Amino acid sequence: MSKFSDYNFAGHKALVRVDFNVPLDKKTFAITDDNRMKATIPTIKKILKDGGSAILMSHLGRPKDGPEDKSSLKHLVPHLKELLGGTNIVFADDCIGEQANASAKNLQPGEVLLLENLRFYKEEEKGDEAFAEKLSKLGDVYVNDAFGTAHRAHASTAVIAKFFPPANRMFGLLMEAEVASAEKVMHETQKPFVAIIGGAKVSDKILIIENLLERATDIIIGGGMAYTFMKANGGKIGNSLCEEDRLQTALDLMEKANKKGVCIHLPADSIIADKFAADANTSAAPSNNIPDGWMGLDIGASACDQFSNIIKKSKTILWNGPMGVFEMANFQHGTKAIATAVANSTQNGAFSLVGGGDSVAAVNQFGFADKVSYVSTGGGALLEYFEGKELPGIAAIK
Ligand code: 3PG
Ligand code: MG
């Protein structure tokens, strides 16, 4: 593979896999979170500045039956143009075929071509070789900047790489930055290393916790999943979220942690509510003694202190998943307190990586994005990376 920043794109047509899988308003198709688009702009700009042209390809959503308006990448064209400072964007309403070929062929240095949604073809997700080869013909250099999709072994993310000689395939700047910060946490770890894991379900996080048991000093568990752990320990959790079929898993994880000398921290107390609603009545209770009819929807004040103290003494911080239902004002204090602790620790020299859809949304919502070391554009991809899996999108380039 080549190094992106050393490559001179003058006269080249760079085929760039981006992850423009951004959320759109259902009615107006306005982009409601453009972070993934913004994150890949430096890559595109460098190609254009060198005197190359960029052919961008992406998926959007999960269309099942071919083309559909709500998943069309055409909705992104005006905003992309704006992000690129007014650069004209040519749009091809099919990612392969005559129009795409002609548009790519006619593309001039400094111009951008955006291809229609790759997933309008089933071949994309199947990793079809012939489809990958057709795409590959559109450019002479392949740049993968789609970290968010790096866990998918799809035609455009993995299979396509072999149609380019190693010297003409590379990561983009976003992919490089994502991989560098993930590696900093996983392989160049400064201890103490705390992993903060939240979210609703234990079942989604078993593999990452297992893998982190090999590396972390402390694992903080918050969010809905904490109550499965509480109940497994014999606690009374009222109507809190619980995966009954994961109680044994929770016990096993805690036992493994114990053997390895990793401290698993559960929230001492919780903010409880009498229903899952923004206007619920609220109170506070120990997380292992929640009355019937009440449910824990956020970590409590003692838990905030408990967790903040651990974060404060850590040198490496990985945060995936919120501490409570931060979308509702009454239950966002815990997530905010953790964001504050992570920001303070970062200011004191710790390296902090925040990833996974909801924790990233929280960090953005509370204005902490530039107070942590790195905010990842990867959800599933980041999770799989920290589960210890090799990501096909990375392996294919290497
Ligand atoms: C994501 O948002 O997770 C990536 O863009 C990959 O999309 P997918 O989960 O539909 O494969
Ligand atoms: Mg996903």
Image (cartoon, helix red, strand yellow):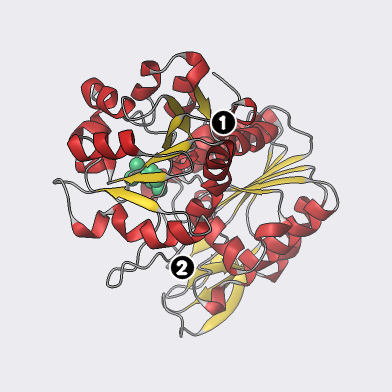
In the image, which is nearer the foreground, mark 2 or mark 1?
Answer: 1
Query: Image check: 30 left or right of 146?
Result: left
Which residue is labeled 2 in the image?
238
Residue labelled with disc 1: 211
Q: Is residue 85 above or below residue 210?
A: below
Tell me residue 314's x, y (percent).
Answer: 79, 45
Observer-nearest of 360 and 112: 112
Q: Quadrant of the N terminus?
A: top right
Q: For residue 185, say whether it is visible.
A: yes
Write the residue at 30% across / 72% down. Answer: 28
| Left or right of 217 in this view: 17 | left
Which one is earlier in the sequence, the residue at label 2 or at label 1? Answer: 1
| Position above or below: 171 against 296 | above
Residue at the location (71% across, 48% down)?
A: 373
Alpha carbon distance from label 2 to label 1: 31 Å
* Residue 237 image position (x, y, % from top left): 49, 63
Amino acid beneath label 2: Gly
Depth check: give the residue in front, 349 or 72. Answer: 72
Q: Is residue 108 above or below residue 71?
A: above
Q: Residue furthest top?
A: 165
Amino acid on which disc 1 is placed:
Asn
Residue at figure coordinates x 58%, y 71% from the top left: 332
Q: Return the x and y of residue 366 as percentages of the image width and height.
A: 63, 69
Q: Is residue 125 left or right of residue 250?
A: left
